[in-house]
Image: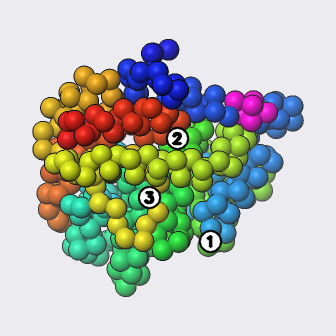
Amino acid sequence: MTAEGDGAGRRVEQVRFANFQRAIEAQRGQLEAAIARVLERGWLVLGPEGEDFERGLADFVGSERAIGCASGTDAIELALRALDLGAGDEVVTQANTCVPTVAAITRAGATPVLCDVDPGAAAMDPASLAGAIGPRTRAVIPVHLYGQCGPIDEICALAAERGIPVVEDCAQAIGAAFGGQRAGTFGRLGCFSFYPTKNLGAIGDGGAVVTSDHDLADRLRKLRVYGQETRYEHVTEGVNSRLDELQAAVLSAKLSRLDADNERRRAIAVEYAKALEAGTARPLSVLPDREHVYHLYVLEVDDREAFRGALEERGIQTLVHYPIPIHRQPAYQRLADGPVPLEVAERLCERVVSLPIYPELTDAEVDHVAAALRAVA
Ligand SMILES: *Cc1c(COP(=O)(O)O)cnc(C)c1O
């Protein structure tokens, strides 16, 4: 263990970017009970825990159905397969997303096309999206990056005009809302990740798709078990992507405190924003009528290396989400030659930096970061 402050007056020497141990300790009793329940029952995959969690998640998000799967990447792939996408079909997403969004598109057999984002909130830019949509576009994947819904109303309106379904990448935005409506319910399908770093994190991998379209939900249930309708009868070509009972039980326990956890993240964000008021570092914009869940607290700075170095000297760990836009990744350079310029995403990738933000940060640690921001930014 590091010499961290305990919130009771001890000096803070280090603020780590994430701390899973604390998240576990915060709920150890409930997590152990959930795990014990699964061991006791001996039902390990696609059982009652999974069904309970799916019902809880659908209710939480405000969707009619939720279908668990093995990861967030799989959730996106399954959503695209449920829409019957495949070879030759194009899917538009934004250039500043993380790689799994794009990996899921190619895994589904479709072709990714990138569009740009807006300079204020780093969200998908509807004008750029309009330019990226072509005759072969069969889906649009806006990414609610960092924990905030982008202009999802405009994106859905534009897609509806062209008859193109919207699949929301909500991996960073569980509980985020726009106009009181939660991420994942605007498009035809919403995709979630329960990777341990996410706001709702499993003790391993997990994911889910939500939809209020019952036909799509039925298709997803088959697709995740090799296209199986009834035992040994395979009606469609599927994959193996299931959420196991252990993860589902843990996730149900954690879901019960997700609203409170997201509230704590917002309270920390308020402190950071206050500390940044007078400085030159600029937090990304909070869009109107949004409930941000601050999966990440992202700033834009002129000299990122100097900024990160100054925080590092004060024991504060920072990360960059993400330093390289998709089309500059060696694996995806072919996407640089797309229909629209991606200049905003390119510029943001050079300027963004993320601060530690998670519910288990102590008040002393938050104060320490805020004081550092006042001194450095
Ligand atoms: C984490 C993440 C994913 C992928 O989720 P995994 O569970 O790691 O497969 C996809 N999109 C975004 C925006 C993410 O943050």
Q: Secondary structure at mark 3?
A: loop
**Mark 1, residue position:** 212
Residue type marked 1: Ser
CA separation in Å, label 1 and label 3: 23 Å
Q: How is the image coloured?
A: rainbow
Q: Magenta part of the protein: which range? A: 28-33
Residue 173, horizontal then vertical, whole percent = 47, 55
Residue at 38% across, 47% down = 271
Using the image, determine if residue 334 lies above or below residue 5: below
At 33% across and 39% down in the image, what residue appears? Answer: 370
How far, Cα to Cα, is label 1 from label 2?
Answer: 31 Å
Q: Amino acid at mark 3?
A: His
- How packed mark 1 is, by other alpha carbons closer than 10 Å (few <14, some 14-19, many 20 or more), is some
> Are the two marked residues, 2 and 3, in contact with CB atoms closer than 8 angstroms?
no
Q: Position of residue 112 (x, y in %)?
A: 32, 57
Asked where in the image residue 364 lies, by quadrant, the reply is top left
Residue named by callout 2: 359
Q: Residue at x 53, y 51 (%)?
A: 262
Tag 3 residue? 292
